[in-house]
Image (cartoon, helix red, strand yellow):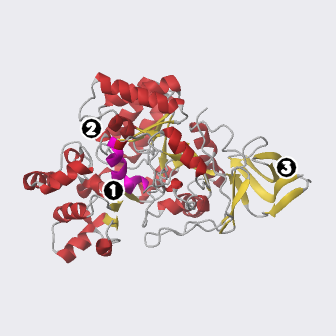
């Protein structure tokens, strides 16, 4: 007698690995696969449906929303069973009371904490996760920003004493089970970190094991140089590299897409394990503070607030935003104010701005865009999220065609998120695989399961086979699609019929079963 029998579906693990078969589950594991005649406590008939390994979100920012008392369903309703958190240089641990402002400032990126208490250490955060209603498995990375802030960061290459402390903190995090470290090189403090510092930390990864994931220094004009830096760090340190949300941002830079892929392929040919993640949209999302020039962001919100109150310094920032700076990715210039949307604000009185472009708002208010942005940041205490349309459809499709490019939602948990938080995987399956035929369904499933599982060392997941953990998604290949839009960004996907996590049914039809079997997966 097995616990669950999934009967009559087409089991797909990847190219050339598709067949009609039944699948039996006992406890957390798949125990049998084939034409089965076994008794089961629960039999689920799925004829005409695809049975696939649970999808892996390789770029999640769910660090804090996971700690809320209600489970977050945005990932599981699109077939995700495992999430990699701690991306873009910011993670839920470690931190200290003195670095708490840094954690709070990143609310637009990783959401707001769901528990009142502060955990500070990985041990405490892991305890909180184990007590939280998890519906997906969690794979943690440690943020470079956390390490740097704990060491008392400075603008240039940190002293040998500070660097030694960062390396010790990273080594301890790795020993506690995190799967690598991430950088966010357009945010404070990563934007001020030279290559030598990151390389020194990457060498700790070589000693202890783990992946280097990087939101690189530029995704527009400096895309190729930024990619070369990440690849060079991986090569010199001898560690796997994961490029975060790869894109060519801004019309003037769309032509660099092919060159970026060639750089990655060249590195792979030379033996470096480098891959990337991507969300299937032409619009990106981040904090409004990302529009500020580098020097304005040094020190975080406390520095920005002081700057905004100083007329001379504010004037200088305005000039830099209007004129640009060498090597700085200035979104207002590369994308244009007419393609930057205010997605979410903190105060109720400014909610009328949500969903409008900066150009539209300034037309109504009769203000200059830079003046408006600086005033809004001051009024909202920096807590403003934006969506900006920076990519071309051709570029997005070119990157999506590659199996070394995984799917990552990069969703920022909030009241009005980018629809990628709820729809990335099903948009890829419905729009790009079924309708646009960028690749076969078998290739798409491998790209979302087996390949990312291998990259992050998840040896018992990513494939449907006896002995593997029963993380499973069943979907209708003719109906699967995203429902989340920019107007209604938190709508569950369609066509996902069944999701199991660790052998437990979490989603059946569109109904959440109440089961919360997700686990914290630490590096072994």
63 vs 480, nearest the viewer = 63
Mark 2 neighbour class, 10 Å CA radius: few under 14, some 14 to 19, many 20 or more: many
Q: Indicate yes or no whether the magenta region holds residue 101.
A: yes
Residue 66 shown left or right of residue 298 in the figure? right
Residue under label 1: 287
Query: In which quarter of the view is residue 334 placed?
Result: bottom left
131 lies above or below 454: below
Q: Nearer the viewer, residue 158 or 115?
A: 115
Q: Distance from label 1 to label 2 (Cα)?
A: 18 Å
Disc nearer the start of the sequence (2/3): 3
Q: Earlier in the sequence, mark 1 or mark 3?
A: 3
Of tags 1 and 3, which is closer to the observer?
A: 1
* Residue 314 shows in this picture: yes
Q: What is the span of residues highlighted in magenta in the rendered image? A: 98-111
Residue at the disc numbered 2: 192
Residue drawn at 64 percent across, 68 percent down: 479
In what element is the residue under mark 3?
A: strand
State the residue position of label 3: 34
In this picture, residue 319 sits left or right of residue 353:
left
Along the line of sight, the residue nearer the viewer: 146 or 371: 146
Q: Secondary structure at mark 1?
A: strand
Q: Which comes before the other along the chain, label 1 or label 2?
A: 2
Q: What secondary structure is the magenta-colored segment mainly?
A: helix
């Amino acid at each position: 007698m097995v616990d669950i029998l999934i009967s009559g579906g087409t089991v797909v693990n990847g190219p050339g690995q598709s067949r009609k078969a039944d699948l039996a589950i006992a406890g957390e594991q798949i125990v049998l696969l084939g034409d089965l005649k076994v008794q089961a406590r629960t039999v689920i008939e799925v004829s005409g449906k695809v049975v696939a390994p649970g999808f892996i979100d390789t770029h999640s920012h769910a660090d804090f929303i996971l700690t809320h008392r209600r489970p977050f369903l945005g990932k599981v309703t699109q077939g995700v069973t495992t999430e990699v958190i701690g991306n873009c240089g910011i993670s839920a641990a470690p931190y200290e009371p003195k670095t708490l402002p840094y954690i709070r400032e990143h609310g637009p990126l990783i959401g707001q904490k769901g528990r009142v208490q502060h955990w500070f250490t990985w041990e405490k955060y892991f305890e909180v996760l184990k007590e939280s209603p998890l519906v997906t498995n969690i794979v943690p990375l440690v943020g470079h920003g956390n390490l740097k802030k704990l060491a008392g960061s400075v603008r240039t290459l940190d002293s040998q004493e500070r660097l030694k402390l960062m390396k010790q903190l990273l080594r301890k995090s790795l020993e506690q089970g995190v799967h690598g470290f991430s950088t966010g090189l357009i945010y404070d403090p990563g934007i001020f970190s030279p290559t030598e510092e990151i390389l020194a930390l990457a060498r700790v990864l070589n000693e202890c094991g783990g992946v280097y994931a990087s939101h690189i220094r530029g995704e527009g004009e400096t895309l190729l140089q930024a990619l070369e830096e990440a690849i060079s760090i991986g090569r010199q340190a001898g560690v796997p590299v994961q490029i975060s949300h790869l894109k060519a941002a801004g019309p003037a830079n769309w032509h660099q897409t092919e060159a970026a892929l060639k750089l990655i392929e060249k590195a792979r040919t030379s033996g470096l394990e480098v891959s990337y993640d991507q969300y299937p949209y032409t619009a990106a999302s981040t904090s409004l503070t990302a529009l500020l020039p580098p020097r304005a962001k040094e020190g975080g919100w406390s520095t920005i607030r002081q700057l905004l109150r100083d007329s001379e310094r504010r004037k200088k920032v305005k000039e830099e935003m209007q004129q640009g700076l060498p090597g700085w990715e200035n979104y207002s210039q590369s994308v244009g104010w007419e393609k930057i949307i205010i997605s979410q604000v903190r105060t109720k009185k400014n909610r009328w701005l949500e969903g409008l472009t900066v150009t539209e708002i300034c037309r109504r208010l009769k203000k200059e865009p830079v003046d408006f942005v600086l005033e809004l940041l001051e009024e909202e205490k920096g807590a403003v999220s934006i969506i900006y349309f920076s990519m071309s459809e051709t570029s997005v499709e070119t990157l999506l065609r590659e199996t070394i490019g995984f799917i990552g939602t990069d969703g920022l948990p909030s009241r009005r998120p980018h629809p990628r938080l709820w729809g990335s995987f099903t948009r890829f399956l419905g729009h790009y695989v079924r309708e646009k035929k960028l690749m076969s369904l078998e290739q798409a499933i491998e790209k979302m399961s087996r390949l990312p599982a291998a990259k992050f060392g998840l040896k018992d997941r990513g494939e449907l086979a006896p002995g593997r953990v029963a993380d499973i998604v069943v979907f209708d290949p003719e109906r699967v699609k995203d429902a989340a839009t920019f107007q209604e960004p938190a709508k569950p996907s369609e066509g996902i019929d069944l999701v199991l996590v660790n052998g437990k049914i979490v989603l059946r039809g569109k109904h959440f079963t109440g089961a919360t079997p997700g686990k914290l997966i630490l590096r072994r």
